Structures are given as C-alpha cells and as structure tokens.
Image (tube, rainbow, N blue to C red):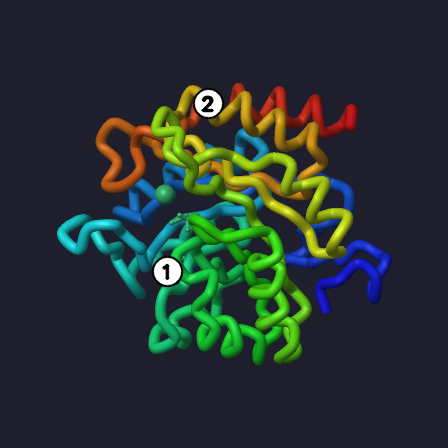
Amino acid sequence: NANRKFHPDNTVIDVAGRKIGGGKLQVIAGPCSVETEEQIITTAIAVKEAGATMLRGGAFKPRTSPYSFQGLGKEGIDLLIQARKITGLPIVTEIMDLSDLDCFADVDVVQVGARNMQNFTLLKALGRSDKPVLLKRGLSSTLQELLMSAEYIMSEGNQNVILCERGIRTFEPATRNTLDLSAVPLLQQKTHLPITIDPSHATGIASLVEPMALCAVTAGCDALEIEVHNDPKNAWSDGAQSLTPAQFAETMKKVKALSEFM
Ligand code: PEP
Ligand code: MN
C-alpha cells in the first residue's frame, strides 16, 4: 500500500547499490532515445563524469506521430547494457507493451511513461515482479490517480515503485507542460514512495531545465531525471530539451551543492 498512514517510514529502493529515497539525491541522466552505440556510450561516460548516478535512454519510444523515430527496441536495450558495463551506471528505460517484457529482464529500473500511467494490465504485470518501476504521472492525471496507479503495481506484490512528476497539460503553451512542483511536498504527505522530478519533459526547453531542477531539489525530491545528449541539435528525439554534457556538468555542480545544503 502506498498510503503514508499505513507505512509511516519512507520507502528506500535499492537500485544496484544506489538508494532512491534514502536521503541522498539520485540523478538519472541520458538521452531521450538510444540512437547509436557511439551516442549512448559517449553520453553515458559524460553523465557519469558529471555525477549522474543512473543512465536513462529510451529504446521503445511513445512518439506522438507514428512517422517519428520509434526507438531501436531490443537493440537499444542491448546498447544500454553495454553502456552500463562501461560506466557501472544502472539503466532506466521505458516499457510500452507487455509483449516486450522479456527484453527488460536485465534492466535495472523499468519506466512506465506518462501515456501508459493508466495501462492497468501493464501495471499489474509489473506488480508481479520485484523490479523497481519508475511510474510517470499521466499528461492530465491527478495526483490521486497517480497514487492509484502505484497501488495497481503494489497490490500485486511489487513495493518498489518510484513516482515521477513530469509536468501536466495546462492552458499555457509557452512550455511543453507545466511542472507541478507542489506535487513533491503533497505526495510526501500522502505516500512513503520516493519522488522523482523530470524537468526536461516538464518544460521542453533546455534553458529551463537547470532552474526547474534546482527548484525540484529545494522542494525535496528524491531524484531527478534529466535528458542529456552528446549532440542535442542532431538528436533523433527531444533535442530542444536536451542538455549538452557541458551544460549538464554545470547544472550538476549547482544541484550537488544545493542537495548537500538541503
Ligand atoms: C521519457 O521519459 O522518455 C518520456 C517519454 O517521458 P514521458 O512519458 O514523461 O512523456
Ligand atoms: Mn524525451
């Protein structure tokens, strides 16, 4: 059960030795999509050097248009595993369909994207393993609905659920989504599960990622998920919101200083 009332202590999720929710900020960084061996490995080494503690990268991509790049699929996961071998960073990647479940056996954290937050069949199936699940808030979902989706996973047995606020649809078109930062303290009152903020998908704009990441740390989040690409201008997806390795390194200096102070 996700409710704080029945479980007053914070849940700490161990991901290959990295503890999410244990007081130390975890930073999941990497490209929107895994594109090539050179791209994922270069980016993985860069984010590790800057202080990221986990590597993200999409292999199965939920794109708005069916004509956009759909991800490398299983090959993308194999490349993430290769990047993990080189850097030691645990890997986080999104599952879109239950029929791909076998591809995720060696993944450290399975991400459920915003578009699948209420795919209850998928949630229940992930609940029957003990693999950590990073559950992203739906585009127009309430916090209560996010928590109920977490319950779908937990009620099947898997207690390793990490919540993620990634911005919600509002009337404001200036940003891709509107980051709901009050979600952090509010969810902390309601649940013992760790909370991640994704300032990349929340804003859609690279220059807004650092300020929103710093606000998220101030709000008390347990982890950040940030898109970083070795060459954002030529990224196959979400280049406009992706930081260069140099920008990410600068952001990490501030994030680390602030999280030590918090
Ligand atoms: C992602 O993190 O790759 C992604 C697609 O994000 P979201 O599901 O939040 O849109
Ligand atoms: Mn993306």
In this picture, is 222 found above or below 209? below
Q: In this view, does 260 lie to the left or right of 229?
A: right
| Image x and y of residue 102, in percent | 40, 76
Q: What residue type is labelled 1?
A: Ile
The residue at 73%/55% (across/down) is 191
Q: In which quarter of the image is residue 172?
A: top left
Which quarter shows the C terminus?
Answer: top right
Looking at the image, residue 173 sits to the left or right of residue 120; the answer is: left
**Residue 89 as seen in the image, left or right of residue 174:** right
At label 2, the amino acid type is Leu
Q: Position of residue 66 (x, y in %)?
A: 17, 55
The quarter of the rendered structure image containing the N terminus is bottom right
Return the residue at label 1: 77
What residue is shown with label 2?
208
Residue 131 figure quarter: bottom right
Report whether 244 appears left or right of 191. left
State how far apart marks 2 and 1 are (Cα). 29 Å
Which of these two is toward me, 214 or 46?
214
Circle 2 or circle 1, nearest the eye: 2
Asked if residue 84 can be seen in this view, the reply is no
Query: Secondary structure beneath disc 1?
Result: helix
